[in-house]
Image (tube, grey):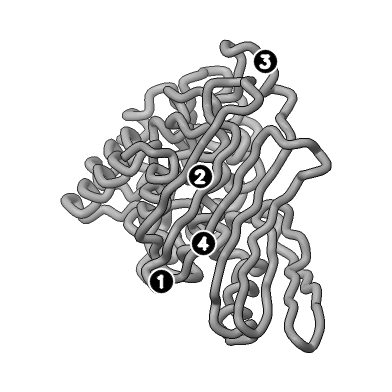
Amino acid sequence: MKQIGWGFIGCGEVTELKSGPAFNEVEGSHVEAVYSRNKTKARSYAERHHINKWYTDAQQLIEDPKVNAIYIATPPSSHATFAIMAMKSGKPVYVEKPLASSYEDCARINRISKQTGVPCFVAYYRRYLPYFKKVKAILDSDTIGTITNVQIRFSVPPRDLDYNSTENLPWRLQSDIAGGGGYFYDLAPHQLDLLQEYFGIITRAHGYGANRAHLYQADDTISACFLFESGLPGSGSWCFVGHKSAKEDRIDVIGDKGSLSFSVYNYNPIKLTTSEGTTNIIVPNPPYVQLPIIKSVIEDLQGFGICTCTSVSATPVNWVMDRILGKF
């Protein structure tokens, strides 16, 4: 069995529980080295997670002969740079979502992947979780009939850090780091990826954004409409400065025989309603939520599986978001 020695570029919050431990849970896989620009952070992460080596130079990590695959867990603005560096060195990439900070950068990543023949996978891990596989199974079973409309509704109050001065804002609100889309560019990707996994590619999208609370420069409220390649219409509403009474994390799928509602971040019980009544379905997820997709990526690299969550399949999410934000 081919052994996969991972090099982590970035060691922030997502790597602590969601993803990091999962790389050591899969047979034939281990974490060999970690990189951070911050020496103290790199050393601390390596020591706490029993990783052999740490670097403050990303190119040195990529060139480490014991590292043969790269996990990129940095903010989106640097995804394309690091992914291209790794692929040009012949090392497969697994990158956090969104694939990049713009549709244009996604196209660059795909071009280099095709030129080098080196794969790039993207952490749209919800596709692989039991909760969302159950949603897909219900939709595919024709239980709610022909799908007629899809609606995303998401509202959360401001976070405490959102009230900070511009110098101390979370990186997700810093346009030069996160791509200028604020929380929308961080939270909408999973929602839009799941919908395209269920219903096909979105071919038309338009949106309106506004800054209603004036806590930071990015839009804090966005409304959008979109159309899938099948002709199915959908809409979305995102508010990141709503009152706590309006807090909501919900996607409604309406069919001609019933409806299905589910959450993307809270994992609330899946609500299935038909003429026979309403059923609430509870589906537990694994402790390391990225374990199923990481296992799929590793098995693909080892040659006895196929991971479909590639950079090519992830790119439409960025196209939709950039259309909604009016980038082109």
Do the numbered discs 4 and 1 sit on residues whose CB atoms are within 8 Å? no
Identity of the amino acid at label 1? Gly
Mark 1 against mark 3, which lies toward the viewer?
1
Q: Which residue is mark 2?
A: 31
Taking depth in this image into account, of 166 and 149 the one nearest to the observer is 149
Q: Nearer the viewer, residue 326 or 72?
A: 326
Q: Amino acid at mark 4?
A: Gly
Q: Is residue 300 visible?
A: yes
Q: Earlier in the sequence, mark 4 or mark 3?
A: 3
In percent of the image, x 65 and y 56: which residue is there?
Answer: 264
Q: Which residue is mark 1?
A: 231
| Pointer 3 residue | 164
The residue that disc 4 covers is 234
Residue 220 left/right relative to 37: right
* In this rendering, the label closer to the viewer, 2 or 1: 1
Q: Disc 4 versus disc 1: distance between alpha carbons?
A: 10 Å
Foreground tag (4 vs 2): 4
Q: Residue 276, how many percent across, how many down?
A: 79, 88
